[in-house]
């Protein structure tokens, strides 16, 4: 289908995992995509995959916790495509430890990327989206914003901030014709999650996966494409009346 023809999207963290799956899906639906990632190599690889498949994409290197990088990412996208309609604030990092053994630098990094990064990318993207006629911002929350996940204090706090920021942005940006929604995924087995899963299994990744899957009524963890399809819906005109919403995509984990 061509649900996003004539649209331009930025996907942060687009070089791997959920971001990669979403960049590929949005391009397959006709969007021109800026694949933004901290890793220039990863961004180039995904942008190249889109181009080889007949799509239109450019790689962008960005540290979303840097205001200069976030502003430059939007400028590079506008220079490349002349418009911006969709921003997927997917880039994120994990954390380790509870409030007692958690590390202050780990807290600052986690809040800086997950919460401040969402703020900065949205700050610079919103005027560009407005000038392009409006569009959609999708923030990446987590079930960790909705339930307490053990030994994940900074991550839970950061994703809770993203959920609240989403509601605030939805109210503030409606007059600019920008819809803002948040996806709260359950665990998707990506490179980002391996440290947390291994720690949960006492250093045994397979044990950590077994313990985690047991928390999911559907009997499996998410796939990147499970989340990408929710992002596609929220980016598309099918969600024209949806803003300020929190979409859990968690295999029933938080329904228990
Ligand atoms: C990493 C993702 O945002 C989910 S947080 C961990 C949830 S679970 O593994 O404890 O079910």
Image (spheres, rainbow, N blue to C red):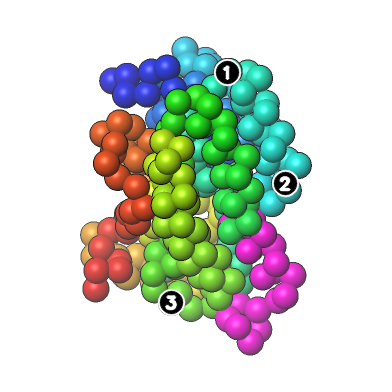
Tell me: residue 23, above or below residue 32.
Answer: below
User: Most extreme residue toward the top, as rendered?
Assistant: 54
Label 3: element kind: loop
Q: CA distance from mark 1 to mark 3?
A: 41 Å
Q: Quadrant of the N terminus?
A: top left
Viewer can see residue 222: no
Q: Which residues are magenta?
A: 97-114
Earlier residue among tags 2 and 1: 2
Label 2: element kind: helix
**Image spot of residue 119 (x, y percent):** 59, 52
Q: Is residue 153 left or right of residue 236?
A: right
Q: Quadrant of the C terminus?
A: bottom left
Residue at the spot of label 1: 81
Tell me: residue 116, above or below residue 77.
Answer: below
What secondary structure is the stretch in magenta mostly built from? helix
Label 1: element kind: helix
Q: CA distance from mark 2 to mark 3?
A: 30 Å
* Quadrant in the rendering for residue 248: bottom left
Residue at left offset 54%, top offset 38%: 126
* Quadrant in the rendering for residue 109: bottom right
**Image spot of residue 164 (x, y percent):** 46, 63
* Quadrant in the rendering for residue 234: top left
Residue at left offset 62%, top offset 23%: 78
Foreground: disc 2 or disc 3: 2
Residue at the spot of label 3: 148
């Amino acid at each position: 289908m061509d649900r996003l023809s004539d649209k331009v999207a930025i996907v942060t963290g687009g070089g791997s995992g959920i971001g990669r799956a979403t960049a590929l899906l949005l391009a397959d639906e006709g969007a021109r995509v800026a694949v933004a990632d901290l890793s220039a190599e990863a961004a180039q690889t995904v942008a190249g995959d889109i181009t080889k498949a007949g799509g239109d994409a450019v790689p962008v290197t960005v540290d979303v916790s840097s205001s200069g990088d976030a502003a430059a990412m939007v400028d590079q996208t506008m220079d490349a495509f002349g418009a911006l309609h969709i921003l997927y604030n997917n880039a994120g990092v994990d954390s380790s430890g509870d409030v007692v053994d958690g590390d202050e630098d780990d807290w600052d990094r986690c809040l800086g990327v997950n919460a401040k990064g969402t703020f900065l990318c949205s700050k610079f993207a919103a005027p560009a989206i407005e000038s392009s006629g409006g569009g959609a911002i999708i923030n990446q929350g987590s079930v960790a914003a909705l339930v307490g996940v053990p030994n994940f204090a900074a991550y839970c706090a950061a994703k809770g901030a993203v959920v609240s920021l989403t509601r605030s942005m939805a109210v503030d940006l409606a007059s600019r014709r920008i819809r803002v929604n948040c996806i709260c995924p359950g665990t998707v087995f990506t490179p980002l999650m391996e440290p947390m899963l291994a720690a949960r299994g006492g250093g045994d990744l397979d044990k950590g996966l077994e313990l985690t899957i047991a928390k999911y009524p559907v009997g499996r963890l998410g796939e990147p494409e499970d989340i990408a399809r929710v992002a596609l819906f929220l980016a598309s005109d099918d969600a024209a009346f949806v803003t300020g919403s929190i979409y859990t995509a968690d295999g029933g984990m938080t329904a228990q």
